[in-house]
Image (cartoon, grey):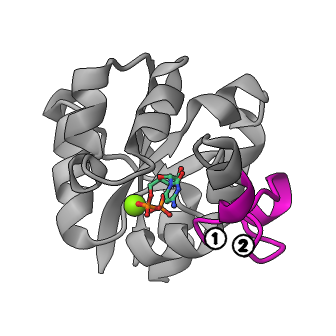
Amino acid sequence: MIERTLVLVKPDGVQRCLTGRIIQRFEDVGLKIVGVKMTWVDKEFTRKHYAEHVEKHFYPGLEALLTVGPVIALVLEGVHAISQVRKMVGATEPRSAQPGTIRGDFAHVSYEYADGKGVTLKNLVHASDSLKSAKREIKLWFKDDELHSYKTVHDVHITE
Ligand code: CDP
Ligand code: MG
């Protein structure tokens, strides 16, 4: 039940200086940061990360967005962390994302608008969508010795 998941604050989130506020939300619910780095990825790496989307119409814009500046990559750990983080991130389309979610609170653009402009949706964060993708993505972004096991005060709260 204790899972690890990959989260990226994408370049739009870093450039809007929202990194701290986004990470704060995950810390607030008791998720543990077990890995973190700032890195600027290239097109080849982006194709590996978004392998499932390479053939889709929105891929060129997505690749442009992910490579335009550095990202903050995080591995978060906690109970049902994968679905918990997806819930906190909200729907892919900011227009549809509920208030209280990261995308719903910090963005508002629609598919229709982004497609009309020929740009990708700037929705601030990426989060693994399943156990299988979390495992694959964590391995892609982090070496084993960049991930850490340690105790937080939340470990006491959730086990006692
Ligand atoms: O990020 P998430 O898992 O919610 O969505 P996805 O379907 O895996 O798509 C990956 C990313 O591609 C999204 O977060 C958007 O930035 C972008 N995208 C887009 O610009 N236009 C679409 N129609 C679908 C996705
Ligand atoms: Mg996805």
Residue neighbourhood size for the residue with mark 1, other residues' Cα within 10 Å, grouped as few (<14), some (14–19), many (≥20): many
Whether residue 146 appears in this view of the structure is no
Residues under labels 2 and 1: Cα distance? 5 Å
Q: Position of residue 7 (x, y in %)?
A: 46, 49
The answer to which of 120 and 28 lies nearer the viewer is 120
Left or right relative to 82: residue 95: right
Queried on whether the Cβ of the residue with tag 2 lies below 8 angstroms from ligand 1, the answer reads no
Whether residue 136 appears in this view of the structure is yes
Q: Under tag 2, what secondary structure?
A: loop
Are dots 2 and 1 in contact, CB under 8 Å? Answer: yes
Q: Position of residue 128 (x, y in %)?
A: 37, 60
- Residue name at image x 37 percent, y 46 percent: 150
In this figure, which residue is indicated by the disc labeled 1? 90
Tell me which numbered mark, 2 or 1, is placed earlier along the sequence. Answer: 1
Q: Mainly helix, strand or loop, the magenta region?
A: loop
Q: Amino acid at mark 2?
A: Ala
Instruction: Please tell me whether residue 106 belongs to the stretch shown in magenta.
Output: yes
Q: Against 158, is 73 above or below?
A: above
Q: Under tag 1, what secondary structure?
A: loop
